[in-house]
Image (cartoon, rainbow, N blue to C red):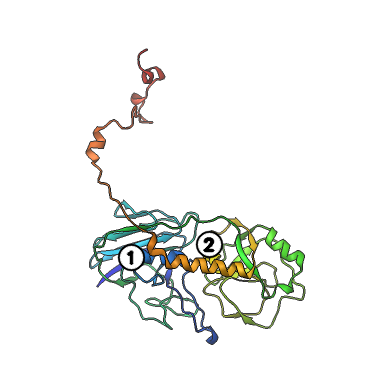
Amino acid sequence: MSKLVIASIGPASSIQDGGRPGSQRYGLVPSGAMDRLALAAANTLLGNAPFAAAVEVGPFGAKFTARGSAVRVALAGAPRSADIAGRAMAPDTSATLADGETLTLGFARGGAFSYLALEGGIAGEPIFGSLSVNARAGLGSPYPRPLQAGDELQTKAASGAPERRIELPSVSDAPIRLVWGPQDDEFSDETKKLFVDSEWKVSATSDRMGYRLEGPVLKHLHGHNIVSDGTVNGSLQVPGMGQPIVLMPDRGTSGGYPKIATVISADLGRLAQTPAGRGFRFHAVSMAEAQAEARKFASMLRTLPDRLRAIESVDLNIEALHDANVAGHAVNAIDAGTWHAAADIAGPD
């Protein structure tokens, strides 16, 4: 069996899959990937089940080294630099690490989470049907905590299959859509209008449990305590301080703050990828529209294999490029001897 050894990794990185639904009535949090589309895309590139466990890499960089034999991987999600032993790896593609080679990931650019899937999946002991990590609850496998340097992920040896890329829809910068409720009657019409008319930012104190939002204070009509009731991914709680919190996959299964609205499931991954400090807005839609978007999202997940494309490799003759004058009048900024006057470049009359 091959393994991928973590040489270095930043915080907010863990093993995540599709989560563990079906046990919330027992108080068991669902967990799972913050961006389900990116997880499914990475797995589809390798022929894995779409919601198989993968490494959810947070905003910071990471390094992984193949040991034992070659390991085939795929990367999707937030854009970031990636290279294998100095060879660039494009986003939304698969690639193979030879034994001893290291994959280096840079910082996320314009997003928060990337997903590194391993061909054949990650070996672990499912807990309530999932490997997903919830550090607060001590759940997850093979490590029930955030990943750290020295951790080893067991997987299958690379199959040698051709590498592929996947064509995903461009990321929209439209407002994040939501439906009102279930306790929007705890807020005045003026407060609800303020909510959707204002710009919001994700606080740097946010985590997988909840995204704290920075913006105007939302005032309650009847106080901020209600009888605790169930929550879902995307619930927008408004605690006493008046700053909303969007509940994410590591949320509690119930809560006692009024929920002014709920982010629709089709947009939750896009919200999860919003970097701290970037401004965005909300837009209210009907329940029928939210359901239609959920069906469209589910359909896109089912048809991800249709978006796979072969990677066309091009062999470059580097020596020939060195000998060719492809740059025209090339100069060296620190060597005045290579500089050309305008007349020299223009040539004789």
Q: Position of residue 223 (x, y in %)?
A: 75, 76
> Which quarter of the figure has residue 271?
bottom right
Residue 291, relative to residue 348: is it above or below? below
Q: Residue at x 41, y 64 (%)?
A: 304
| Quadrant of the drawing holding the C terminus | top left
User: Where does label 2 land, which residue?
Assistant: 270
Q: Are marks 2 and 1 in contact (CB under 8 Å)?
A: no
**SS for dot 1:** helix
Q: Position of residue 120 (x, y in %)?
A: 31, 71
Is residue 160 or residue 273 the one in the foreground? 160
> Which quarter of the figure has residue 205?
bottom right
Residue type, label 1 = Leu
Residue 322, relative to residue 153: is it above or below? above
Q: Is residue 12 visible?
A: no
**SS for dot 2:** helix
Q: Position of residue 188 (x, y in %)?
A: 76, 69
Q: Residue at x 57, y 80 (%)?
A: 253
Q: Residue at x 56, y 59 (%)?
A: 276
User: Where does label 1 land, which residue?
Assistant: 46
